[in-house]
Image (spheres, grey):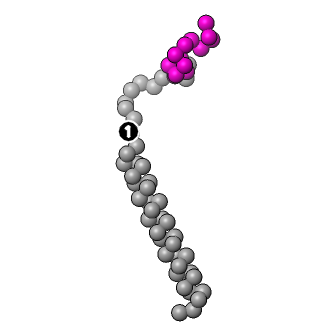
Amino acid sequence: MSPVLMIVMLICAWMAVALAMLWGMLRLSRRHHPTPQNKPQETPAERRRHTHGRPLHGH
């Protein structure tokens, strides 16, 4: 085998391992990602009011 072919095979093997690890991590993250609950959508003003816990104008 020529050295160029060995280097190309080494790079291909490294890419295969990297893609397999990425695919596995994406599967795990998708599996453990919380699913959204079906609830009515809030308006942006309501969302801000809930996150800050005070009125929008600071009164």
Question: Residue 3, image x and y in percent?
Answer: 59, 89
Q: Residues within 10 Å of mark 1 (few under 14, many from 20)?
A: few
Helix, strand or loop at label 1? It is loop
The residue positioned 47% from the left and 60% from the top of the image is: 22
Whether residue 45 is situated above or below residue 18 in the rendered picture: above
Q: Which residue is mark 1?
A: 35
Q: Is residue 36 left or right of residue 59?
A: left
Write down the region rendered in magenta: 46-59
Residue furthest right as drawn: 57
Q: Quadrant of residue 56?
A: top right
31 sits left or right of 18 in the view: left
For the C terminus, which image quadrant?
top right
Q: Amino acid at mark 1?
A: Thr
Residue appearing at x 53%, y 93% in the figure: 1
Res. 43 in view: no
Q: Is residue 29 left or right of residue 14?
A: left
Residue 1, compared with residue 56, is above or below; it is: below
Residue at 39 percent of width and 35 percent of height: 36
Residue 18 point in image, percent of width and height: 49, 66
Rendered image quadrant of residue 40: top left
Question: 39 above or below 30?
Answer: above
